[in-house]
Amino acid sequence: MTSSPQPPTLPSDRPDPTGHAHAGHGHASGHGHSHSHGPAAPVSKHLRKVIAAVLIPFATAVFVGMAVLWPGGAPAHERSGVGFDRQTQQGKVVSLQQVDCKSVNASQVPATGDTSTPQGREAQAAETGECKKATVEVGSGPDKGRTFVEIVQPGAPRQLENGQEVVVAYAPDAPRDLQYSVVDVNRKMPMALLAGIFAVAVVLVGRMRGLFALIALAVSFAVLTLFILPAILQGSNPLLVAVVGASAIMLIALYMCHGLTARTSVAVLGTLVSLLLIGLLGSLFIDWAFLSGNTDDNTGLIHGLYPNIDMSGLLLAGVIIGSLGVLDDVTVTQTSAVWELRQADPSMGPRALYRAAIRIGRDHIASVVNTLVLAYAGAALPLLLLFSIANSSMGAVANSELVAEEIVRTLVGSIGLVASVPVTTALASLVVSADRPGTAAPGAAAPGTGPAAGPVRGRGRRRKR
Protein backbone atom coordinates (compact mmCIF):
# COMPACT_ATOMS: atom_id res chain seq x y z
CA MET A 1 0.00 0.00 0.00
CA THR A 2 1.25 3.46 -0.82
CA SER A 3 1.50 6.25 1.71
CA SER A 4 -1.62 8.00 0.49
CA PRO A 5 -3.84 9.57 3.21
CA GLN A 6 -5.93 7.12 5.17
CA PRO A 7 -8.82 7.44 5.46
CA PRO A 8 -9.28 10.08 2.74
CA THR A 9 -10.46 13.45 3.95
CA LEU A 10 -13.72 14.86 2.64
CA PRO A 11 -13.65 18.03 0.53
CA SER A 12 -15.64 20.91 1.94
CA ASP A 13 -18.18 20.77 -0.91
CA ARG A 14 -19.21 17.23 -0.14
CA PRO A 15 -21.64 15.89 2.47
CA ASP A 16 -20.03 14.42 5.59
CA PRO A 17 -20.31 10.70 6.38
CA THR A 18 -23.42 11.26 8.47
CA GLY A 19 -25.25 12.42 5.39
CA HIS A 20 -25.45 16.09 6.37
CA ALA A 21 -25.28 18.06 3.18
CA HIS A 22 -24.34 21.58 2.22
CA ALA A 23 -26.30 23.91 0.01
CA GLY A 24 -25.71 24.33 -3.68
CA HIS A 25 -26.19 20.76 -4.92
CA GLY A 26 -29.70 20.86 -6.23
CA HIS A 27 -28.51 19.59 -9.63
CA ALA A 28 -28.51 16.06 -8.22
CA SER A 29 -32.24 15.88 -8.97
CA GLY A 30 -31.26 15.23 -12.59
CA HIS A 31 -30.44 11.68 -11.55
CA GLY A 32 -34.12 10.91 -11.29
CA HIS A 33 -34.42 11.31 -7.49
CA SER A 34 -37.40 13.02 -5.90
CA HIS A 35 -35.14 15.30 -3.89
CA SER A 36 -31.56 15.20 -2.70
CA HIS A 37 -29.54 16.79 0.04
CA GLY A 38 -26.19 16.53 -1.69
CA PRO A 39 -24.69 14.93 -4.80
CA ALA A 40 -25.92 11.35 -4.94
CA ALA A 41 -23.47 8.75 -6.14
CA PRO A 42 -24.68 7.46 -9.50
CA VAL A 43 -25.58 3.82 -9.83
CA SER A 44 -26.29 1.80 -12.92
CA LYS A 45 -29.76 1.07 -14.21
CA HIS A 46 -29.20 -2.61 -13.48
CA LEU A 47 -28.46 -1.94 -9.81
CA ARG A 48 -31.47 0.32 -9.52
CA LYS A 49 -33.61 -2.48 -10.92
CA VAL A 50 -32.16 -5.00 -8.46
CA ILE A 51 -32.76 -2.71 -5.48
CA ALA A 52 -36.27 -1.91 -6.70
CA ALA A 53 -37.01 -5.62 -7.15
CA VAL A 54 -36.31 -6.09 -3.43
CA LEU A 55 -37.81 -2.94 -1.94
CA ILE A 56 -40.95 -2.44 -4.03
CA PRO A 57 -42.52 -5.80 -3.02
CA PHE A 58 -41.49 -5.14 0.60
CA ALA A 59 -43.03 -1.65 0.61
CA THR A 60 -46.16 -2.98 -1.07
CA ALA A 61 -46.49 -5.71 1.56
CA VAL A 62 -46.06 -3.15 4.35
CA PHE A 63 -48.78 -0.83 3.15
CA VAL A 64 -51.12 -3.70 2.27
CA GLY A 65 -50.55 -4.97 5.81
CA MET A 66 -51.45 -1.55 7.18
CA ALA A 67 -54.65 -1.54 5.14
CA VAL A 68 -55.62 -5.03 6.38
CA LEU A 69 -54.80 -4.31 10.03
CA TRP A 70 -56.11 -0.74 10.04
CA PRO A 71 -58.20 -0.44 13.23
CA GLY A 72 -60.43 2.53 12.48
CA GLY A 73 -59.92 3.98 15.97
CA ALA A 74 -59.45 2.68 19.50
CA PRO A 75 -62.31 0.50 20.82
CA ALA A 76 -64.65 2.12 23.32
CA HIS A 77 -64.78 0.94 26.93
CA GLU A 78 -66.41 1.93 30.19
CA ARG A 79 -64.07 4.13 32.20
CA SER A 80 -62.71 2.48 35.32
CA GLY A 81 -61.80 5.74 37.06
CA VAL A 82 -58.33 4.35 37.88
CA GLY A 83 -55.01 5.91 36.92
CA PHE A 84 -55.07 7.43 33.43
CA ASP A 85 -58.51 5.93 32.78
CA ARG A 86 -60.34 8.86 34.36
CA GLN A 87 -62.48 11.68 33.09
CA THR A 88 -60.43 14.86 33.35
CA GLN A 89 -61.14 18.55 32.85
CA GLN A 90 -59.14 21.76 33.02
CA GLY A 91 -59.18 23.88 36.18
CA LYS A 92 -57.60 26.87 37.86
CA VAL A 93 -56.71 27.73 41.45
CA VAL A 94 -58.73 30.91 42.18
CA SER A 95 -57.83 31.34 45.85
CA LEU A 96 -55.38 29.93 48.36
CA GLN A 97 -55.21 30.31 52.13
CA GLN A 98 -53.19 28.85 55.00
CA VAL A 99 -55.12 26.71 57.51
CA ASP A 100 -54.26 24.51 60.46
CA CYS A 101 -54.06 20.90 59.25
CA LYS A 102 -55.79 19.64 62.40
CA SER A 103 -58.81 21.91 61.79
CA VAL A 104 -59.47 20.34 58.38
CA ASN A 105 -58.67 16.73 59.41
CA ALA A 106 -55.86 16.62 56.86
CA SER A 107 -53.94 13.98 58.81
CA GLN A 108 -54.80 10.88 60.76
CA VAL A 109 -52.36 9.55 63.33
CA PRO A 110 -52.82 5.77 63.77
CA ALA A 111 -55.31 4.87 66.50
CA THR A 112 -52.55 3.09 68.41
CA GLY A 113 -50.44 6.25 68.39
CA ASP A 114 -47.66 4.32 66.65
CA THR A 115 -45.39 6.76 64.88
CA SER A 116 -42.55 4.32 64.24
CA THR A 117 -43.58 3.89 60.61
CA PRO A 118 -42.91 6.55 57.95
CA GLN A 119 -46.67 6.97 57.44
CA GLY A 120 -47.24 7.54 61.14
CA ARG A 121 -44.44 10.08 61.42
CA GLU A 122 -45.70 11.98 58.36
CA ALA A 123 -49.22 12.04 59.76
CA GLN A 124 -48.02 13.36 63.12
CA ALA A 125 -45.94 16.08 61.42
CA ALA A 126 -48.87 17.08 59.23
CA GLU A 127 -51.19 17.32 62.22
CA THR A 128 -49.16 20.13 63.73
CA GLY A 129 -48.27 21.82 60.41
CA GLU A 130 -49.85 24.40 58.14
CA CYS A 131 -51.94 23.16 55.22
CA LYS A 132 -53.13 25.02 52.14
CA LYS A 133 -56.82 25.31 51.38
CA ALA A 134 -57.18 25.84 47.63
CA THR A 135 -60.40 26.82 45.89
CA VAL A 136 -60.34 25.42 42.37
CA GLU A 137 -62.65 26.44 39.53
CA VAL A 138 -63.50 23.93 36.81
CA GLY A 139 -62.64 25.50 33.45
CA SER A 140 -64.06 23.00 30.94
CA GLY A 141 -66.78 20.40 30.54
CA PRO A 142 -70.46 20.50 31.56
CA ASP A 143 -69.63 21.82 35.05
CA LYS A 144 -67.57 24.76 33.83
CA GLY A 145 -67.50 27.49 36.49
CA ARG A 146 -68.14 25.12 39.37
CA THR A 147 -65.73 25.39 42.33
CA PHE A 148 -64.49 22.89 44.88
CA VAL A 149 -61.97 22.83 47.74
CA GLU A 150 -58.66 20.97 47.69
CA ILE A 151 -56.56 20.54 50.87
CA VAL A 152 -52.80 20.37 50.28
CA GLN A 153 -50.68 18.95 53.10
CA PRO A 154 -47.25 20.52 53.82
CA GLY A 155 -45.37 17.36 52.82
CA ALA A 156 -47.27 16.75 49.59
CA PRO A 157 -45.02 16.40 46.53
CA ARG A 158 -47.30 18.70 44.48
CA GLN A 159 -47.90 22.13 45.97
CA LEU A 160 -50.47 24.52 44.49
CA GLU A 161 -50.15 28.25 43.86
CA ASN A 162 -52.76 30.94 43.39
CA GLY A 163 -53.72 31.31 39.70
CA GLN A 164 -52.11 28.00 38.75
CA GLU A 165 -53.63 25.97 35.89
CA VAL A 166 -54.41 22.41 36.99
CA VAL A 167 -55.93 19.16 35.72
CA VAL A 168 -58.93 17.90 37.69
CA ALA A 169 -60.43 14.41 37.71
CA TYR A 170 -64.20 13.86 37.66
CA ALA A 171 -65.82 10.91 39.45
CA PRO A 172 -69.53 10.95 38.53
CA ASP A 173 -70.47 8.23 41.04
CA ALA A 174 -68.93 10.01 44.04
CA PRO A 175 -70.86 12.39 46.38
CA ARG A 176 -71.23 15.85 44.86
CA ASP A 177 -68.66 17.47 47.15
CA LEU A 178 -66.10 14.79 46.26
CA GLN A 179 -66.68 14.50 42.51
CA TYR A 180 -63.76 16.73 41.55
CA SER A 181 -60.14 16.54 42.71
CA VAL A 182 -56.82 17.92 41.50
CA VAL A 183 -54.69 15.19 39.91
CA ASP A 184 -51.95 17.18 38.16
CA VAL A 185 -50.79 20.61 37.07
CA ASN A 186 -51.24 21.94 33.54
CA ARG A 187 -47.88 21.84 31.73
CA LYS A 188 -49.09 22.57 28.20
CA MET A 189 -47.46 25.97 27.89
CA PRO A 190 -43.86 25.02 28.86
CA MET A 191 -44.13 21.80 26.85
CA ALA A 192 -45.37 23.66 23.76
CA LEU A 193 -42.63 26.29 24.15
CA LEU A 194 -39.94 23.61 24.45
CA ALA A 195 -41.29 21.85 21.35
CA GLY A 196 -41.21 25.15 19.46
CA ILE A 197 -37.58 25.79 20.48
CA PHE A 198 -36.68 22.27 19.36
CA ALA A 199 -38.34 22.74 15.97
CA VAL A 200 -36.67 26.10 15.39
CA ALA A 201 -33.25 24.72 16.35
CA VAL A 202 -33.65 21.74 14.02
CA VAL A 203 -34.65 23.92 11.06
CA LEU A 204 -31.96 26.55 11.71
CA VAL A 205 -29.18 23.98 11.88
CA GLY A 206 -30.52 21.34 9.49
CA ARG A 207 -32.28 23.71 7.04
CA MET A 208 -34.25 21.67 4.49
CA ARG A 209 -32.95 18.41 5.93
CA GLY A 210 -34.16 19.52 9.36
CA LEU A 211 -37.57 20.50 7.97
CA PHE A 212 -38.01 17.11 6.32
CA ALA A 213 -36.90 15.45 9.58
CA LEU A 214 -39.65 17.29 11.48
CA ILE A 215 -42.23 16.24 8.88
CA ALA A 216 -41.02 12.64 9.16
CA LEU A 217 -41.30 12.89 12.96
CA ALA A 218 -44.91 14.04 12.63
CA VAL A 219 -45.67 11.18 10.24
CA SER A 220 -44.04 8.66 12.60
CA PHE A 221 -46.14 9.96 15.49
CA ALA A 222 -49.26 9.70 13.32
CA VAL A 223 -48.50 6.07 12.43
CA LEU A 224 -47.96 5.31 16.11
CA THR A 225 -51.16 6.96 17.38
CA LEU A 226 -53.49 6.23 14.45
CA PHE A 227 -52.35 2.71 13.54
CA ILE A 228 -50.07 0.91 16.01
CA LEU A 229 -51.79 1.73 19.31
CA PRO A 230 -55.43 1.35 18.16
CA ALA A 231 -54.63 -1.87 16.23
CA ILE A 232 -53.11 -3.44 19.36
CA LEU A 233 -56.16 -2.36 21.41
CA GLN A 234 -58.43 -3.91 18.78
CA GLY A 235 -56.82 -7.29 19.50
CA SER A 236 -54.40 -7.61 16.57
CA ASN A 237 -51.13 -9.43 17.21
CA PRO A 238 -48.82 -6.80 18.79
CA LEU A 239 -45.70 -8.23 17.12
CA LEU A 240 -47.26 -8.18 13.65
CA VAL A 241 -48.60 -4.66 14.18
CA ALA A 242 -45.20 -3.45 15.43
CA VAL A 243 -43.34 -4.97 12.47
CA VAL A 244 -45.74 -3.45 9.93
CA GLY A 245 -45.89 -0.08 11.69
CA ALA A 246 -42.13 0.14 12.28
CA SER A 247 -41.48 -0.78 8.64
CA ALA A 248 -43.85 1.95 7.46
CA ILE A 249 -42.16 4.50 9.73
CA MET A 250 -38.75 3.38 8.46
CA LEU A 251 -39.69 3.71 4.80
CA ILE A 252 -41.38 7.07 5.17
CA ALA A 253 -38.78 8.63 7.49
CA LEU A 254 -35.66 7.46 5.66
CA TYR A 255 -36.82 8.33 2.14
CA MET A 256 -38.32 11.63 3.25
CA CYS A 257 -35.17 12.71 5.12
CA HIS A 258 -32.50 11.32 2.80
CA GLY A 259 -34.11 11.19 -0.63
CA LEU A 260 -35.21 8.43 -2.98
CA THR A 261 -31.69 7.21 -3.72
CA ALA A 262 -29.83 3.92 -3.91
CA ARG A 263 -27.86 5.01 -0.84
CA THR A 264 -31.06 5.37 1.18
CA SER A 265 -32.34 2.05 -0.17
CA VAL A 266 -29.24 0.27 1.12
CA ALA A 267 -29.80 1.85 4.55
CA VAL A 268 -33.40 0.61 4.44
CA LEU A 269 -32.23 -2.93 3.68
CA GLY A 270 -29.67 -2.83 6.51
CA THR A 271 -32.29 -1.55 8.95
CA LEU A 272 -34.76 -4.24 7.85
CA VAL A 273 -32.26 -7.07 8.40
CA SER A 274 -31.40 -5.71 11.84
CA LEU A 275 -35.07 -5.37 12.82
CA LEU A 276 -35.69 -8.99 11.82
CA LEU A 277 -32.77 -10.07 14.01
CA ILE A 278 -34.11 -8.03 16.93
CA GLY A 279 -37.56 -9.57 16.48
CA LEU A 280 -36.19 -13.13 16.46
CA LEU A 281 -33.90 -12.63 19.46
CA GLY A 282 -36.56 -10.72 21.40
CA SER A 283 -39.18 -13.41 20.83
CA LEU A 284 -36.74 -16.15 21.87
CA PHE A 285 -35.49 -14.55 25.09
CA ILE A 286 -38.82 -13.07 26.21
CA ASP A 287 -40.33 -16.58 26.04
CA TRP A 288 -37.26 -18.25 27.55
CA ALA A 289 -37.09 -15.80 30.47
CA PHE A 290 -40.88 -16.09 31.05
CA LEU A 291 -41.40 -12.33 30.82
CA SER A 292 -45.12 -11.59 31.00
CA GLY A 293 -44.94 -7.89 30.15
CA ASN A 294 -47.35 -7.17 33.01
CA THR A 295 -45.13 -5.67 35.70
CA ASP A 296 -46.58 -2.36 36.91
CA ASP A 297 -49.84 -0.53 37.52
CA ASN A 298 -50.10 0.76 33.95
CA THR A 299 -49.65 -2.61 32.26
CA GLY A 300 -51.97 -4.15 34.86
CA LEU A 301 -54.64 -1.58 34.01
CA ILE A 302 -54.24 -2.28 30.29
CA HIS A 303 -54.57 -6.00 30.88
CA GLY A 304 -57.64 -5.45 33.06
CA LEU A 305 -59.39 -3.27 30.48
CA TYR A 306 -58.34 -5.35 27.46
CA PRO A 307 -57.66 -8.93 28.66
CA ASN A 308 -57.24 -10.20 25.10
CA ILE A 309 -54.03 -8.22 24.54
CA ASP A 310 -50.90 -10.38 24.48
CA MET A 311 -48.78 -8.52 27.03
CA SER A 312 -45.54 -10.38 26.20
CA GLY A 313 -46.16 -9.57 22.54
CA LEU A 314 -46.67 -5.95 23.57
CA LEU A 315 -43.28 -6.04 25.29
CA LEU A 316 -41.64 -7.38 22.13
CA ALA A 317 -43.38 -4.72 20.04
CA GLY A 318 -41.90 -2.08 22.32
CA VAL A 319 -38.42 -3.53 21.85
CA ILE A 320 -38.74 -3.35 18.04
CA ILE A 321 -40.15 0.18 17.94
CA GLY A 322 -37.67 1.44 20.53
CA SER A 323 -34.72 0.09 18.54
CA LEU A 324 -35.83 1.59 15.22
CA GLY A 325 -34.72 5.17 15.85
CA VAL A 326 -31.15 4.26 16.77
CA LEU A 327 -30.93 1.75 13.91
CA ASP A 328 -31.84 4.44 11.38
CA ASP A 329 -28.98 6.59 12.62
CA VAL A 330 -26.40 3.80 12.38
CA THR A 331 -27.42 2.42 8.98
CA VAL A 332 -27.64 5.83 7.31
CA THR A 333 -24.24 6.80 8.72
CA GLN A 334 -22.58 3.60 7.54
CA THR A 335 -24.09 3.78 4.08
CA SER A 336 -23.08 7.40 3.65
CA ALA A 337 -19.55 6.61 4.85
CA VAL A 338 -19.15 3.86 2.23
CA TRP A 339 -20.45 6.11 -0.55
CA GLU A 340 -18.15 8.96 0.42
CA LEU A 341 -15.11 6.71 0.71
CA ARG A 342 -15.83 5.30 -2.74
CA GLN A 343 -16.15 8.75 -4.28
CA ALA A 344 -12.99 9.94 -2.53
CA ASP A 345 -11.04 6.96 -3.91
CA PRO A 346 -12.79 5.26 -6.85
CA SER A 347 -10.08 2.58 -7.02
CA MET A 348 -11.17 1.05 -3.71
CA GLY A 349 -12.70 -2.40 -4.06
CA PRO A 350 -15.43 -3.87 -1.86
CA ARG A 351 -12.99 -5.30 0.70
CA ALA A 352 -11.07 -2.05 1.04
CA LEU A 353 -14.33 -0.12 1.35
CA TYR A 354 -15.59 -2.52 3.99
CA ARG A 355 -12.39 -2.31 6.04
CA ALA A 356 -12.32 1.49 5.92
CA ALA A 357 -16.02 1.94 6.72
CA ILE A 358 -16.10 -0.66 9.48
CA ARG A 359 -13.51 1.39 11.37
CA ILE A 360 -15.98 4.27 11.37
CA GLY A 361 -18.71 1.90 12.44
CA ARG A 362 -16.74 0.58 15.40
CA ASP A 363 -16.30 4.08 16.80
CA HIS A 364 -19.97 4.81 16.26
CA ILE A 365 -21.23 1.60 17.79
CA ALA A 366 -19.08 1.98 20.91
CA SER A 367 -20.73 5.30 21.74
CA VAL A 368 -24.27 4.37 20.63
CA VAL A 369 -24.43 1.16 22.69
CA ASN A 370 -23.27 3.05 25.78
CA THR A 371 -25.91 5.69 25.07
CA LEU A 372 -28.62 3.05 24.75
CA VAL A 373 -27.70 1.37 28.03
CA LEU A 374 -27.48 4.66 29.92
CA ALA A 375 -30.83 5.79 28.49
CA TYR A 376 -32.55 2.71 29.90
CA ALA A 377 -30.67 3.02 33.20
CA GLY A 378 -31.67 6.66 33.51
CA ALA A 379 -35.33 5.83 32.90
CA ALA A 380 -35.20 3.10 35.57
CA LEU A 381 -33.14 5.12 38.08
CA PRO A 382 -35.90 5.40 40.75
CA LEU A 383 -36.40 1.63 40.55
CA LEU A 384 -32.67 1.01 40.90
CA LEU A 385 -32.62 3.32 43.93
CA LEU A 386 -35.36 1.24 45.56
CA PHE A 387 -33.32 -1.92 45.10
CA SER A 388 -30.28 -0.15 46.51
CA ILE A 389 -32.23 0.98 49.57
CA ALA A 390 -33.42 -2.59 50.11
CA ASN A 391 -29.78 -3.80 50.00
CA SER A 392 -30.67 -6.31 47.29
CA SER A 393 -27.84 -8.15 45.56
CA MET A 394 -27.17 -7.53 41.87
CA GLY A 395 -28.32 -11.07 41.12
CA ALA A 396 -31.64 -10.54 42.88
CA VAL A 397 -32.14 -7.21 41.15
CA ALA A 398 -31.41 -8.64 37.69
CA ASN A 399 -33.66 -11.64 38.34
CA SER A 400 -36.74 -9.55 39.15
CA GLU A 401 -39.10 -9.36 36.19
CA LEU A 402 -39.26 -5.57 36.27
CA VAL A 403 -35.49 -5.25 35.79
CA ALA A 404 -35.16 -8.37 33.61
CA GLU A 405 -37.49 -6.76 31.07
CA GLU A 406 -35.19 -3.77 30.78
CA ILE A 407 -32.11 -5.97 30.56
CA VAL A 408 -33.61 -8.05 27.74
CA ARG A 409 -34.86 -4.91 26.00
CA THR A 410 -31.44 -3.26 26.21
CA LEU A 411 -29.33 -6.27 25.23
CA VAL A 412 -31.55 -7.42 22.36
CA GLY A 413 -31.66 -3.89 20.95
CA SER A 414 -27.90 -3.54 21.36
CA ILE A 415 -27.22 -6.84 19.57
CA GLY A 416 -29.33 -5.68 16.64
CA LEU A 417 -27.52 -2.36 16.71
CA VAL A 418 -24.10 -4.00 16.66
CA ALA A 419 -25.15 -6.36 13.86
CA SER A 420 -26.44 -3.48 11.74
CA VAL A 421 -22.92 -2.09 11.29
CA PRO A 422 -21.27 -5.03 9.44
CA VAL A 423 -24.52 -5.91 7.63
CA THR A 424 -25.13 -2.40 6.29
CA THR A 425 -21.44 -1.81 5.54
CA ALA A 426 -21.20 -5.07 3.58
CA LEU A 427 -24.37 -4.30 1.59
CA ALA A 428 -23.23 -0.76 0.79
CA SER A 429 -19.72 -1.92 -0.21
CA LEU A 430 -21.12 -4.55 -2.57
CA VAL A 431 -23.66 -2.21 -4.13
CA VAL A 432 -21.35 0.76 -4.70
CA SER A 433 -18.53 -1.48 -5.99
CA ALA A 434 -20.79 -3.22 -8.50
CA ASP A 435 -20.87 -0.09 -10.67
CA ARG A 436 -18.29 0.37 -13.38
CA PRO A 437 -17.45 3.49 -15.43
CA GLY A 438 -19.87 3.86 -18.28
CA THR A 439 -22.71 1.96 -16.59
CA ALA A 440 -24.24 4.94 -14.81
CA ALA A 441 -27.58 6.28 -15.87
CA PRO A 442 -27.64 8.88 -18.65
CA GLY A 443 -26.79 12.34 -17.39
CA ALA A 444 -24.91 11.04 -14.36
CA ALA A 445 -21.18 11.18 -14.01
CA ALA A 446 -19.21 8.12 -13.04
CA PRO A 447 -17.65 8.06 -9.59
CA GLY A 448 -14.53 10.16 -9.47
CA THR A 449 -15.26 12.10 -12.66
CA GLY A 450 -17.15 15.21 -13.60
CA PRO A 451 -18.17 18.15 -11.45
CA ALA A 452 -19.74 16.02 -8.73
CA ALA A 453 -16.38 14.51 -7.94
CA GLY A 454 -14.90 17.76 -6.65
CA PRO A 455 -11.80 19.65 -7.81
CA VAL A 456 -9.27 17.36 -6.12
CA ARG A 457 -10.90 14.05 -6.94
CA GLY A 458 -8.56 11.51 -8.50
CA ARG A 459 -5.30 13.33 -7.72
CA GLY A 460 -2.92 11.40 -5.53
CA ARG A 461 -5.74 9.38 -4.00
CA ARG A 462 -5.50 6.07 -5.78
CA ARG A 463 -4.32 3.16 -3.77
CA LYS A 464 -2.71 -0.05 -4.82
CA ARG A 465 -4.43 -3.01 -3.32
Image: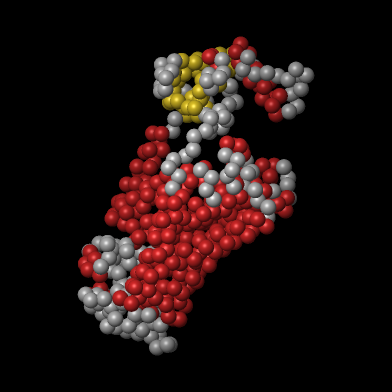
Residue positioned 44% across, 23% down in the render: 91
Nearest to the observer: residue 380 or residue 97: 380
* Residue 448 visible to an observer of this rendering: no
Quarter of the image with the C terminus in it:
bottom left
- Quadrant of the rendered structure where residue 71 is? top left
The number of callouts visible is 0
Give the residue at the far right of this rendering: 112
- Look at the picture and state if 456 lies above or below 19: below
Residue 199, percent from left and from top: 34, 47
Residue 399, percent from left and from top: 70, 51
Residue positioned 68% across, 52% down in the render: 290
Nearest to the observer: residue 224 or residue 4: 224
Residue positioned 56% across, 19% down in the render: 173
Horizontal arrangement in the rendering, residue 303 relative to residue 452 (left or right): right
Nearest to the observer: residue 14 or residue 71: 71
Residue 300, percent from left and from top: 62, 39
The colour scheme of the drawn protein is: secondary structure
* Residue 114 visible to an observer of this rendering: yes
Give the residue at the far top of this rendering: 103
Residue positioned 78% across, 19% down in the render: 112
- Look at the picture and state if 458 lies above or below 247: below
Horizontal arrangement in the rendering, residue 49 relative to residue 245 (left or right): left
- Look at the picture and state if 277 lies above or below 173: below
Horizontal arrangement in the rendering, residue 443 relative to residue 363 (left or right): left
Give the residue at the far front of this rendering: 68
Quarter of the image with the N terminus in it:
bottom left
Residue 314, percent from left and from top: 56, 49
